[in-house]
């Protein structure tokens, strides 16, 4: 009974934490995480989605933002700003320890997946967390102002430039990290977290071998769009800029051919029939993860449903 969750961003981290708490044995969970947001800043390797997933699985995340650490302080950033250094990407004092130690280990030749495994042990995380690849595959955002690196687009420019497309640089030559294909092979449920389809899920699917490993598996996606808007972040804006009206059904259509199950929020119950033309199994439920109890409840319901394939509309 192995469960694999593909995740990126804050919504993905929350859902993964819900699955970890809902599984009888959390060691039966592998979270495969997007690395497209990763970049080097102050000479440090920053892995936002890996850190957001790990902090959330460990209960260390900043509840207000979803990323970074709870109980954080900002003395280093303040001192950097005094020196005229860049402070647009907020690196908290506790969070900096993660970037310093990861960078030190990478420079000593350790692969990212090994570093993540050691950090998970240190943080007491029972689930397994894997970067989809140990290679660098930075997401480039093609906008009306030209091509922007992901964090330049997402944080520095507050995702305001209009997107035209995305490029996952080097994906075609990237190798899945050790354990990724094995976890997918033994999985009896693969869950696409309610993450941004374009910049969190697509970069994972773009690594050679991943899509093929999903073939024939029950693959359930949870919609990140509720009531035509993204719960958090630029997903709805990206749909619109790519010429698609954002909706849960649009997300299902985006995953057409890949998914056998789709979870949409009660708000979008009227789209269930449309979605059923795309994915045979449709679940309508409360997908708003506004507390850890609600993350747990959503994950428990989705897991039971995918395994029992009990349809409820
Ligand atoms: N997101 C922001 O909007 N502003 C920030 O200053 C910021 C800093 C940051 C530091 C560490 C980290 O792990 C994540 C951080 N994020 C920040 C989120 C980051 O941009 C992620 O890529 C998004 O969560 C999308 O996945």
Image: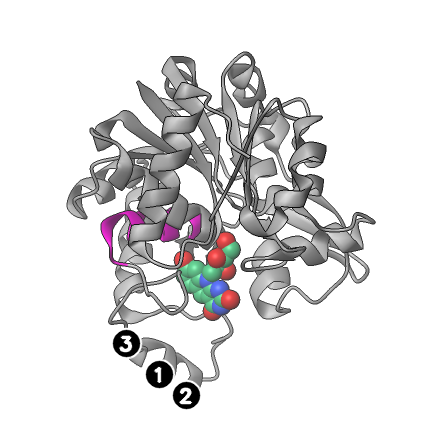
Mark closer to the observer (2, 3):
3
Tag count in the figure?
3
Q: Is residue 257 above or below residue 223?
A: above
> Where residue 175 sits: x, y (%)?
50, 24
Question: Callout 3: few (<14), some (14-19), or many (20+) C-alpha neighbours within 10 Å?
Answer: some
Q: Residue at x 69, y 48 (%)?
A: 247
Would residue 5 be visible to someone looking at this image?
yes
Residue carrying label 1: 79
The answer for how far apart the CA atoms under marks 2 and 3 are is 16 Å
Disc on res. 28: none
Disc on res. 82: 2
- Which comes before the other along the chain, label 2 or label 3? 3
Contact flag, marks 2 and 3 (Cβ < 8 Å): no
Q: Which residues are magenta?
A: 48-60
Contact flag, marks 1 and 2 (Cβ < 8 Å): yes
Q: Residue at x 55, y 48 (%)?
A: 266
């Amino acid at each position: 009974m192995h469960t694999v969750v593909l995740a990126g961003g804050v919504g993905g981290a929350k859902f993964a934490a819900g699955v970890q708490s809902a599984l009888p044995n959390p060691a039966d969970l592998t979270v495969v995480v997007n690395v497209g947001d990763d970049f080097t800043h102050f000479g440090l390797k920053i892995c936002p989605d890996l850190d957001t997933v790990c902090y959330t699985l460990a209960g260390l995340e900043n509840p207000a933002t979803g990323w970074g650490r709870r109980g954080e302080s900002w003395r280093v950033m303040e001192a950097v700003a005094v020196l005229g250094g860049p402070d647009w990407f907020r690196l908290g004092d506790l969070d900096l320890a993660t970037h310093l130690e990861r960078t030190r280990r990478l420079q000593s030749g350790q692969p990212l997946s090994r570093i993540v495994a050691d950090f998970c042990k240190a943080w007491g995380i029972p689930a397994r967390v894997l970067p989809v690849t140990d290679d660098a595959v930075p997401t480039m955002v093609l906008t009306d102002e030209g091509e922007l690196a992901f964090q330049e687009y997402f944080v520095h420019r507050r995702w305001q430039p209009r997107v035209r497309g995305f490029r996952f640089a080097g994906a075609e030559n990237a190798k899945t990290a050790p354990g990724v294909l094995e976890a997918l092979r033994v999985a009896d449920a693969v869950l696409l977290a309610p993450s941004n389809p374009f910049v969190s899920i697509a970069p994972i699917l773009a690594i050679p071998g991943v899509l093929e490993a999903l073939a024939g598996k029950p693959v359930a996606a949870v919609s990140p769009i509720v009531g035509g808007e993204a719960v958090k972040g630029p997903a709805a804006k990206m749909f619109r800029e790519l010429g698609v009206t954002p909706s849960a059904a649009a997300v299902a259509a985006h995953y057409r051919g890949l998914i056998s199950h789709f979870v949409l929020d009660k708000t979008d119950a009227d789209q269930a029939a449309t979605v059923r033309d795309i994915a045979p199994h449709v679940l309508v439920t409360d997908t708003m993860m506004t507390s850890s109890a609600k993350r747990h409840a959503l994950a428990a319901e989705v897991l039971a449903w995918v395994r029992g394939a009990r349809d409820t509309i």
